């Protein structure tokens, strides 16, 4: 059984258009606005979108819960763990384990308590804040302007907006880490909101990506070796 067969729904929902060609509008889901007036230690001109972003490589591991709304439709909340190249994706029905360190992947179905093990057949990327950042073309960075800081999900975030060529986008960057934790994009008839809630970095252990101990295991490795 191919990994792609299990992930096609997820990827169809999450691999969105390039954010450079998309835009958004919306509220801050209860975040508290902090005034950036004359008392600010850093002027608005000093805070840029490019300098606020950080690369994925500086974090050995991370975790988040992703909430997605596309054109007014909410998708089920999902969770993702990343640790040293290994990943675990979990939604309300399944958990998918991708373990390059073991040259193995696993599909766990909660209803049946079954875990199917197999060789990694394809390299698929789950949607993360780092992929979201990579999708933004560098030539539009200068048009993404700083709008102030807020408290969102218990984190201080710097807020940036892009508004040009019928495209509106709003990005919330966690100041301590340089990670996009929320983005809203609107363009023409397309609207989306991605919220990477409860983001944690460099706190995971191997136990967070362990297979369920009491699962019924079906090892298909020897049958699916390519």
Image (cartoon, rainbow, N blue to C red):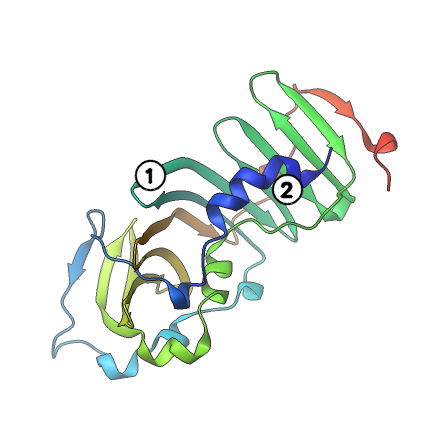
Which residue in the structure is indicated by mark 2? Answer: 206
How many marks overall? 2
Tell whether 218 sits left or right of 4. right
**Could you say where residue 153 lies in the image, as x and y percent from the top left?**
30, 49
Give the x, y percent position of residue 32. 17, 54
Q: Position of residue 101 (x, y in %)?
A: 75, 48
Does residue 185 appear to the left or right of 150 in the view shown? right
Of marks 1 and 2, which one's residue comes earlier in the chain?
1
| Mark 1 neighbour class, 10 Å CA radius: few under 14, some 14 to 19, many 20 or more | few
- Image vertical order of residue 19 relative to residue 165, above or below: above
Q: Seen from this angle, which residue lies furthest bottom? A: 45
- In the rendered structure, the answer to whether residue 105 lies left or right of residue 36 reads right
Judged from this view, the residue extending furthest toward the front is 189
Q: Work out whether 145 lies above or below 201.
A: below
Q: Residue at x 33, y 39 (%)?
A: 73
Quadrant in which the C terminus appears: top right
What is the secondary structure assignment of the residue under circle 1? strand
């Amino acid at each position: 059984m191919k990994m792609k067969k299990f992930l096609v729904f997820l990827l169809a929902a999450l691999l969105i258009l390039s954010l450079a060609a998309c835009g958004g509008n919306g509220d801050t889901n209860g975040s508290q606005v902090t005034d950036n007036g004359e008392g600010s230690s850093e002027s608005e001109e000093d805070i840029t979108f490019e300098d606020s972003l950080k690369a994925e490589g500086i974090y050995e591991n991370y975790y988040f819960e992703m909430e997605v709304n596309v054109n007014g439709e909410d998708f089920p909340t999902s969770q993702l763990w990343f640790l040293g190249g290994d990943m675990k994706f979990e939604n309300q029905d399944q958990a998918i384990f991708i373990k390059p360190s073991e040259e193995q992947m696993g599909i766990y179905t909660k209803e049946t308590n079954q875990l199917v093990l197999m060789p990694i057949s394809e390299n698929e990327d789950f949607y993360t804040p780092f992929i979201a950042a990579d999708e933004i073309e560098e030539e539009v960075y200068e048009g993404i302007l700083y709008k102030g800081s807020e408290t969102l999900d218990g984190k201080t975030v710097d807020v940036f907006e892009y508004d040009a060529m019928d495209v509106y986008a709003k990005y919330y960057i966690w100041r301590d880490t340089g990670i996009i934790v929320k983005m809203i994009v609107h363009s023409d008839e397309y609207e989306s909101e991605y919220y990477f809630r409860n983001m944690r970095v460099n706190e995971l252990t191997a136990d967070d990506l362990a297979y369920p101990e009491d699962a019924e295991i079906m090892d298909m490795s020897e049958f699916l070796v390519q």
